[in-house]
Amino acid sequence: MTQSTHPLTRIIVALDFAAEAEALALVERLDPARCRLKVGKELFTRLGPAFVETLQRRGFEVFLDLKFHDIPNTVAAACAAAADLGVWMVNVHVTGGARMIEAARERLSRMPQPPLLIGVTVLTSLDESDLAAIGCPGSPRERVLALARLGQASGLDGIVCSPLEAAPVREALGRDFLLVTPGVRPAGAAAGDQKRVMTPPEAVAAGADHLVIGRPITQAVDPLAAIAEIERSLTRA
Ligand SMILES: O=C(O)c1cc(=O)[nH]c(=O)n1[C@@H]1O[C@H](COP(=O)(O)O)[C@@H](O)[C@H]1O
């Protein structure tokens, strides 16, 4: 699974836009053979499942990034709703615990076409001092590793982490555990609110399977040129 990901299909474009027209203006210029799309809280809250269906009708695989975090019954039902929508990937917060993840896995195992089930470990916007402030002492790396182990044992297909943790997680959890990394910034791009970042080729070299990239593409003067440059950097890597 992890070995076969072609450089040009590793990119997941985060469609973090305020309005459908803006998002579709970019989508119309993208090729579903070369990238996947992520729909997150902003666009889903505005546009709902219909927007996901629009993207899927255009041939795109969709990562529904709603980061479910609730009691097991509620999260399992939400994951089933995502499966009914036909998305490619859905995510939950690993900190919802083993029973929550197991319930989601069990529910998805009864669906005809379950999406990949991925767990968010430590948000890429947090560093060690942020973790300490929410009562979680220790480094992001230690915490990501612990949550990745819990997630794998509970039935996840993989995790979301920063590229900085990809190598140790890959080493500890093996090749078949998917690593999805936001916190990706081409050389020279602004980090914004991301604290744990690497460039696209660094992320892939560290073991990332899928790179979630938003503003370096969506806010670029020429988004297609930005994607092409990221693809070139990955092909060279
Ligand atoms: O689950 C995610 O996708 C996610 C997890 C995480 O730890 N950090 C993170 O940035 N994300 C998402 O990845 C995208 C990153 O966007 P940019 O920072 O604009 O590249 C955003 O849509 C975030 O919601």
Image: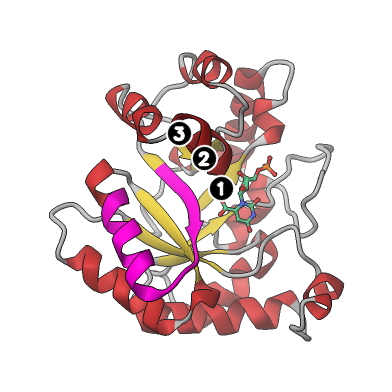
- The correct choice, above or below, for 157 with respect to 26 in the image is below
User: Alpha-carbon neighbours of circle 1 within 10 Å: few (<14), some, or many (≥20)?
Assistant: many
Query: 74 or 169, which lies in front?
Result: 74
- In three-dimensional space, the C-alpha distance between marks 1 and 2, rounded to whole angstroms, equals 5 Å
Q: Which residues are magenta?
A: 63-82
Q: State which quadrant residue 205 falls in.
A: bottom right
Residue sitting at x 70%, y 34%: 215
- In three-dimensional space, the C-alpha distance between marks 2 and 3, rounded to whole angstroms, equals 5 Å
Question: What label does residue 35 carry, if any?
Answer: 3
User: Alpha-carbon neighbours of circle 3 within 10 Å: few (<14), some, or many (≥20)?
Assistant: many
Q: Is residue 1 visible?
A: no
Kind of residue sitting beneath label 1: Leu
Report helix, strand or loop for mark 3. loop
Residue sitting at x 66%, y 62%: 123
Residue beneath disc 2: 11
Residue beneath disc 1: 211
Question: What label does residue 114 carry, if any?
Answer: none
